[in-house]
Amino acid sequence: MLALGGESERAFRLTSASQDGQRSRTDEETIISILANRSAAQRLEIKQAYFEKYDDDILNYKEAYLQVHERDLEADIEDDTSGEVRNLLVSLLQADRDEAYEVDEALAEQDATSLIEAGEGRFGTDESTFTYILTHRNYLQLQATFKIYETLSGTDILDAIDSEATGTLKDCYVTLVRCAKNPQLYFARRLNAAMKGAGTDEETLIRIIVGRSEVDLETIKDMYLEKYDVTLKDALSSECGGDFKRLLIEILH
């Protein structure tokens, strides 16, 4: 797997997560972590931020997936998922997220109100409203929406999602919200989770460290140290071994 690079490597991992017959169920967590994080990823450097191009990335992944596996990624996801999870993943594949670097405060208030009415303000949950807003608004816009949501409802958006959604769909929403709020902190948490408990999730470590090595790995390392009070290098050294450890530590440098 490490012989693959860039889009082809991610296409391989997408097929591993969605290919029919190879798993008892589709690994939506892997799919959502790959697709969600291709959008306007924020990098914190000396109080500044920059954003990756979302539409081009998604189109590149779809093309690479087709070239490597001679199958359509969207069709595979539609075959192996269902309900609102399928709608959310397909929406991400459409690459329709707004890429502007501007915030429309009126729209943020409108979206915050819509989210309240779709969740806390009614019996049951209108998942389609959550899916549309979380997959179409740019990250700065979502950050403004989440702040207004908390002001209007008195509830953090993550707490609201915990109450309103369940299962894989909740995991997807939480991933999108955390990425919108602070992508590098999200990745730091995923790395820590991959090394906790018995055994090590090597695929997650490879996916994040290799995938973010030319994007925002330095900031992820800073976030890891800030949150867990240990360097990512030291954490990898204590949890991994052999050539695998040496490879990841080399990439960290």
Image (cartoon, rainbow, N blue to C red):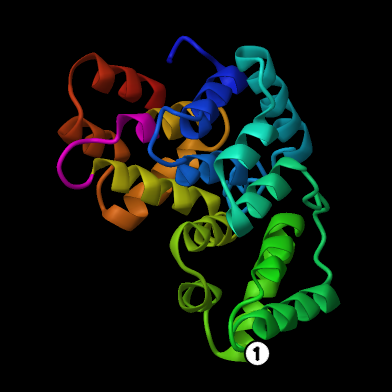
Instruction: Assess whether residue 203 is covered by the magenta stretch.
Output: yes
Q: Residue at x 47, y 58 (%)?
A: 171
Q: Residue furthest top?
A: 3
The spot of residue 22 in percent (x, y) is: 41, 27
In the image, 175 versus 42, the foreground residue is 175
Name which residue lies at 59% across and 88% down. Answer: 123
- Find the magenta span and give its range: 196-205
Answer left or right for 101 relative to 196: right
Q: Is residue 54 visible?
A: yes
Rendered view: 253 above or below 75: above
Q: Is residue 224 magenta?
A: no
Report crowding for label 1: few under 14, some 14 to 19, many 20 or more residues within 10 A (C-alpha): few
Which residue bears the numbered disc 1? 152
In what quadrant of the picture does the N terminus appear?
Answer: top left
The C terminus: image quadrant: top left
Q: Is residue 129 above or below residue 212?
A: below
Q: Residue at x 54, y 30 (%)?
A: 14
Q: Please tell me whether the stretch drawn in magenta is mainly helix, strand or loop.
A: loop
Q: Amino acid at mark 1?
A: Leu
Which residue appears at 28% of the width and 34% of the height? 233
- Between 187 and 17, the residue placed more toward the observer is 17
Classify residue 133 as left or right of residue 182.
right
User: Callout 1: helix, strand or loop?
Assistant: helix
Position in image of residue 206 (x %, y %): 39, 28
Image position, residue 152 (x, y; %): 65, 90
